[in-house]
Every structure is written in structure tokens, then in C-alpha cells.
Amino acid sequence: MIQWYPGHMAKTKRILEEDLKLVDLVVEVLDARIPLSSQNPDLTELLGKKKRIIVLNKMDLANTLISAQWKNYFARDYPVVLLNSLTGQGMKDLLAIIEGEGREINKLLQEKGRNKRAVRIMVAGIPNVGKSALINMLAGTKTSKTGNKPGVTRGRQWIVVREDIQLLDTPGILWPKFDDEDVGFRLALTGAIRDEVFDEEEAACKLIEYIIQIDKGILEKAYNIEIDEEIEIAYDILANIGRKSGCLMSGGRVDRSRAASRLINDFRKGKLGSISLEVPGDDS
Ligand SMILES: Nc1nc2c(ncn2[C@@H]2O[C@H](COP(=O)(O)OP(=O)(O)OP(=O)(O)O)[C@@H](O)[C@H]2O)c(=O)[nH]1
Ligand SMILES: [Mg+2]
């Protein structure tokens, strides 16, 4: 499952390093369903002493109790907020944290005899975690952008979120890391890596196995099937899902590939309910 070639990654990293020089604070966006798998471990080194806030985004798609555990997990090291970037739930908390960090940063500036100024932030994260949605939510309907900042010479613009907060208009792209096969599957299932680079049927089977561990009733209800875990393996269950949802080939054989796409899409859209794929302490 290779998507990020070394050259591609080096360039992405270079751009990120340039952008980091422009900001005081990084808002790291993680997928609340897979907070560890969607985190890029290299960011810590890249940030150095730069401040970071962790956003567990897509909270609406994740299990509420597990998300609360993740919040505690990350809160040991960083300010953290649960967010739905489509509805804005959690946005007030995020702004309050940014404001607080901004005050800290200004305190340090003033101690050095420098003037008070707006805190400069950027949003960063791996693909598909909701960076653009978050930026849109923060920007709101505001069109006012400032021009006289170093970033603009390179085509970067600042969005004035509030008098005290300026946001880089382009998110920092981080690369997903998956030496571990399970991490790869989680990234695939949530849409962080492109569909062409993983085996959908295999990923769908992983998802079935995972959901059955939580509650087989989720699948039984969603697809009007009955699951006997004693005798059926995920591959059989996938076939049943296909049969019941009309994924058939000519001749009436089940089209497992289409069944897999359907299941994965249903999961991504939240049609199977709010399901977290990772629990603190799982493997970390
Ligand atoms: N349910 C739900 N969907 C979300 C949320 N935030 C973003 N999305 C959806 O997730 C998908 C990806 O969101 P984007 O904002 O495009 O993600 P991104 O990180 O900018 O992705 P790239 O630009 O590809 O790196 C879109 O379909 C969004 O509508 C959220 O909080 N809840
Ligand atoms: Mg985007």
C-alpha cells in the first residue's frame, strides 16, 4: 500500500517546514475514529517548541465514549478539542483554546519588549481528516485577507478569523504513516489513502471483523442479515451483505467487490452509526 513516494514526501515536508516558520501555533487535525493512525509521528520533531492544539475531528462519526477516552489521552500533553467541522459543534471550545494560546504567546512577546499582535495559526493533518472543512468553518463568510505578510510572496494568504487570530489559508499537508498493516486498513477505511492502493475486499473484511467485535447487530440491522460468528467468516458475511443489497453479477453470483465498496462507503458516511476503529491502549 504505497501512495507517498520519497520525492513526493520530501517536497511536502519542505513546504510544511516553510509554512511552519510563518505561524505561532499549529492546529493538528486527527480523525476521531482513528486518532493514532491518523497522526503523523514526524510532526513532533518538525514542530520543535512550536505550540500545537489537537482537534479530534469528525466526532459525529466516532463513538462518544471512546472519543472521551481519546480526549483524556491527548490532554496529558496538549490542549485537545472534539469537533464536527460540518456543523461547528466544538468550534467555540477550539476558539477559546486558540485565544488562550494567543495570550500566552503575546505574554512572551511582550516580555521580550515586542508588540502585541494577532496569533498566527495553521491547520495541518493527513489527507481527508477535514482540514478544508475546518478552515472554511474558521473563515466563515469572511473575505478580508491581509496582504503584507511574508507568506503572501509565496502565494500564501492570511484569513482574519478575528481581530486576535489570523489563519494561513492553505493547510499543512502531512503524510500518513503505516508500517503496520492494521494502521493501513484504518487509513483505507476512513478514506485517508486512495481506494486504488488497497484491496477493498480485504479492507471490508477487516471492517466486518472489527464491527462484529463491537456488536454484530450493527451489520444485521443495516443489511437485514443474520450472522452466525461460529460458522461464518468475514468473507461469507461480505457475500451475504452483497446478496441482500443487490450486488450481483450476471448469472446471479454475488459481486463481492461491489459489496465491499458499498460497505466501506456506508461506514464512511456514518450509515452504520458512530464507530471508532481505535481505542486508547489498543496497541500504543
Ligand atoms: N461527518 C463529518 N464529515 C466531515 C467532517 N469534517 C469533514 N468531513 C468530510 O470529510 C471529507 C474530507 O474533508 P476535507 O475538509 O475535504 O478534508 P481535507 O483534510 O481538507 O482533505 P484533503 O484536502 O484531501 O487533504 C469531506 O467529505 C467532508 O465533508 C466532520 O466533522 N464530520
Ligand atoms: Mg483539503
Image (cartoon, rainbow, N blue to C red):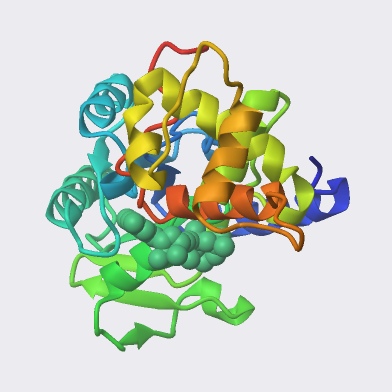
Q: How many marks?
A: 0
At x 40% / y 75%, what residue is drawn? 158
Q: Is residue 80 above or below residue 223?
A: above
Residue 281 picture quarter: top left
Q: Is residue 143 above or below residue 67?
A: below
Q: Which of 121/238 is in front?
A: 238
Q: Position of residue 146 (x, y in %)?
A: 37, 83
At x 25% / y 49%, what residue is drawn? 83
Q: Position of residue 25 (x, y in %)?
A: 38, 49
Does residue 40 appear anywhere in the picture? Answer: no
Q: Which of 41/14 is in front?
A: 41
At x 61% / y 21%, what residue is drawn? 233
Residue found at the far front of this picture: 251
Q: Which of 189/76 is in front?
A: 189
Pick the quarter of the image with the N terminus: top right
Residue found at the far bottom of this picture: 143
Q: Is residue 57 above or below residue 65?
A: below
Q: Is residue 85 above or below residue 264?
A: below
At x 75% / y 42%, what residue is drawn? 199
Does residue 105 appear anywhere in the picture? Answer: yes
Q: Position of residue 150 (x, y in %)?
A: 52, 73
Asked whether, in this view, residue 37 is left or right of residue 275, the answer is right
Asked whether, in this view, residue 74 is left or right of residue 231, the answer is left
Q: Position of residue 132 (x, y in %)?
A: 44, 67
Asked whether, in this view, residue 72 is left or right of residue 245, the answer is left
